[in-house]
């Protein structure tokens, strides 16, 4: 028995139209996706039912789709990718510097696709495979997308994702900094150095170490860029780390979302703004630990 359905160009058209019907008011008239091609593919890897190929502006739908999933629903998932605003993708992916980009991208795409009424006429008991992918928190990729949406609201998420709205992207990036893994990054360490050029470098660098400790991370082996009187962050002693962690907790309580965005936002524009705000708070309240 062949438990598969033959995909047709009509399924691609239906999937595309279902996305436009549901999200069209958020999609700008100049979206590159309006110039995209769509085709039935015979060369996709096993278990891959569809694919969006951005550099070719191409939506591909496998010629055979698993029986439990309506082919047009698979096409809709790929067209949600297609209509993702380039500004959102570029800022959140940040030149491939965001290690959580795939989880965010596929999780949000799955979540938004599942908001669209299914094209299945009689049943639809298939569940996107991305529900099986988990963050360290235990939340699946689509659940993490739901968590971001709960923080910012559906309208803001859609304005960021489909419209590329600047303020909406900032809000989504800030929320995502609290939902996705909080880890050390070279981008953050570079931005801390830049933000502290005039003043506050040690305050920011110590607070960064504290933020990592609060997030349950180990201190990185990376160079402190002469912001601290130690060569690398992991040379901070256990006693010093305890003092730094406590002050970081206090700063987090004062600054809330800004604190997480300063150290963990993927969007560089959001992070720069948050670091500037956090620096002013630290200059008033932070007592340097290392000497």
Image: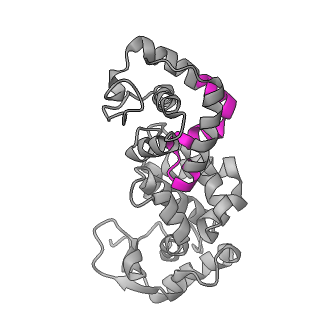
Residue range corresponding to the magenta coloring: 249-271
Predominant secondary structure, magenta span: helix
Is the residue 124 above or below the residue 246 in the image? below
- Judged left or right of residue 168, residue 39 is left
Is the residue 291 above or below the residue 190 in the image? above
Residue 11 falls inside the magenta stretch: no
Q: Residue at the spot x=43%, y=69% of the render?
A: 67
Q: Quadrant of the N terminus?
A: bottom left
Q: Is residue 157 visible?
A: no
Q: Is residue 176 visible?
A: yes
Measuring from the top left, give residue 187's x and y in whole percent.
Answer: 42, 47
Is the residue 38 above or below the residue 239 in the image? below
Q: Residue at the spot x=42%, y=49% of the render?
A: 133
Q: Nearer the viewer, residue 168 or 279?
A: 279
Q: Residue at the spot x=35%, y=32% of the render?
A: 220
Measuring from the top left, give residue 189's x and y in whole percent.
Answer: 42, 41
Is the residue 127 above or below the residue 64 in the image? above
Q: Residue at the spot x=67%, y=65% of the render?
A: 159
Q: Nearer the viewer, residue 66 or 225?
A: 225
Measuring from the top left, give residue 169's x and y in whole percent.
Answer: 61, 59
Direction top: furthest residue: 239
Residue 254 falls inside the magenta stretch: yes
Q: Nearer the viewer, residue 288 or 91?
A: 288
- Judged left or right of residue 238, residue 159 is right
Measuring from the top left, give residue 240's x and y in whole percent.
Answer: 44, 15
Q: Quadrant of residue 184?
A: top left
Q: Quadrant of residue 256?
A: top right
Q: Nearer the viewer, residue 245 or 40?
A: 245
Q: Quadrant of the C terminus?
A: top left
């Amino acid at each position: 028995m062949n438990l598969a359905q033959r995909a047709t160009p009509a399924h691609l058209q239906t999937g595309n139209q279902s996305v436009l019907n549901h999200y069209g008011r958020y999609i700008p008239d100049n979206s590159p996706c309006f110039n995209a091609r769509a085709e039935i593919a015979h060369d996709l890897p096993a278990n891959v039912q569809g694919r969006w190929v951005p550099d070719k502006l191409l939506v591909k739908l496998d010629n055979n789709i698993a029986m439990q999933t309506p082919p047009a629903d698979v096409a809709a998932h790929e067209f949600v990718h297609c209509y993702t605003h380039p500004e959102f993708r570029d800022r959140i992916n940040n030149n491939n510097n965001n290690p959580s980009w795939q989880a965010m991208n596929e999780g949000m795409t799955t979540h938004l696709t599942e908001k669209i009424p299914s094209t299945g006429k009689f049943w639809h008991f298939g569940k996107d495979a991305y529900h099986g992918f988990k963050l360290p928190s235990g939340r699946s990729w689509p659940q993490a997308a739901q968590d971001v949406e709960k923080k910012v609201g559906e309208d803001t998420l859609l304005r960021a994702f489909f419209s590329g709205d600047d303020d909406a992207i900032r809000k989504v990036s800030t929320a995502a900094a609290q939902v996705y893994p909080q880890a050390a990054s070279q981008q953050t360490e570079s931005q801390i150095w830049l933000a502290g050029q005039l003043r506050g470098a040690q305050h920011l660098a110590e607070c960064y170490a504290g933020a990592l400790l609060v997030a349950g991370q180990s201190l990185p082996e990376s160079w402190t860029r002469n912001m601290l009187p130690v060569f690398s962050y992991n040379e901070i002693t256990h006693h010093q780390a305890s003092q730094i962690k406590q002050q970081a907790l206090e700063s987090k309580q004062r600054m809330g979302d800004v604190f997480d965005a300063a150290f963990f936002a993927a969007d560089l524009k959001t992070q720069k703004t948050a670091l500037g705000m956090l620096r002013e708070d630290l200059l008033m309240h932070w007592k340097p630990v290392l000497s």
